[in-house]
Image: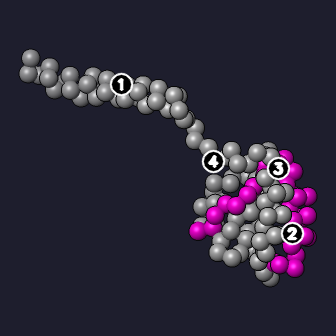
Amino acid sequence: MASYVYLIQNGDLFNIGFTNNLERTRIDLRPGELVAFLITENPEPLIKNLRKTYVDNRLPGSDYYRLANSQVKECKSLLNVDGSTNYFQPFLKGPSLFIFFMVSWFTLTYIIIQFAADPILSRFG
């Protein structure tokens, strides 16, 4: 199963970790912002390497690190290898969004007329 290795910034601190559910982790670590992530089948070696690299910057007893700008850039470049910028793209866009909207609009209108307006109007006619 694919896992996510992530870098989340919360103020001047950074959380480095991995999860199977990136959206849940983003919610759990609010108000932190997702800086970078990588989708991988085997996250343990990468996490060990990152944590070993930044061990001097780690806050004791936590997964938080106080990283310099150069370290953040380095970590981002390691994690942005696998097209992770496409994770939060919209499901529909452009013409497909317009078509979806129009079909939804007509379907909803039909349902309202069929099941709400017709029964009421048939009582008077």
Q: Earlier in the sequence, mark 4 or mark 3?
A: 3
Residue in front for this viewpoint, 68 or 1: 68
Q: Which residue is mark 2?
A: 51
Q: Residue at x 82, y 49 (%)?
A: 81
Q: Are marks 1 and 3 in contact (CB under 8 Å)?
A: no
User: Is disc 2 placed on a helix, strand or loop?
Assistant: helix
Amino acid residing under circle 4: Phe
Alpha-carbon span between mark 3 and mark 2? 18 Å
Q: Which residue is mark 1?
A: 106
Q: Are marks 2 and 4 in contact (CB under 8 Å)?
A: no
Amino acid residing under circle 3: Val
Location of residue 6 in the rendering, given as x and y in whole percent from the top left corner? 75, 59
Disc 2 crowd rating (10 Å Cα; few below 14, some 14-19, many 20+) is: some
Q: Which residue is mark 3?
A: 81
Residue in front for this viewpoint, 82 or 110: 82
- The segment highlighted magenta reads 31-58
Quarter of the N terminus within the rendering: top right
Q: Is residue 49 above or below residue 104?
A: below
Q: Is residue 81 left or right of residue 84?
A: right
Q: Earlier in the sequence, mark 3 or mark 2?
A: 2
Q: Is residue 39 left or right of residue 119?
A: right
Q: Is residue 78 above or below residue 51?
A: above
> Which disc, if any, is residue 45?
none
Alpha-carbon span between mark 4 and mark 3? 16 Å
Disc 4 crowd rating (10 Å Cα; few below 14, some 14-19, many 20+) is: few
Q: Which residue is mark 4?
A: 88
* Number of numbered discs overlaid on the protein picture: 4
Of all residues, the one furthest to the top in this rendering is 125
Q: Earlier in the sequence, mark 2 or mark 4?
A: 2
Location of residue 14 in the rendering, given as x and y in whole percent from the top left corner? 73, 71
Q: Residue at x 57, y 41 (%)?
A: 90
Quarter of the C terminus within the rendering: top left
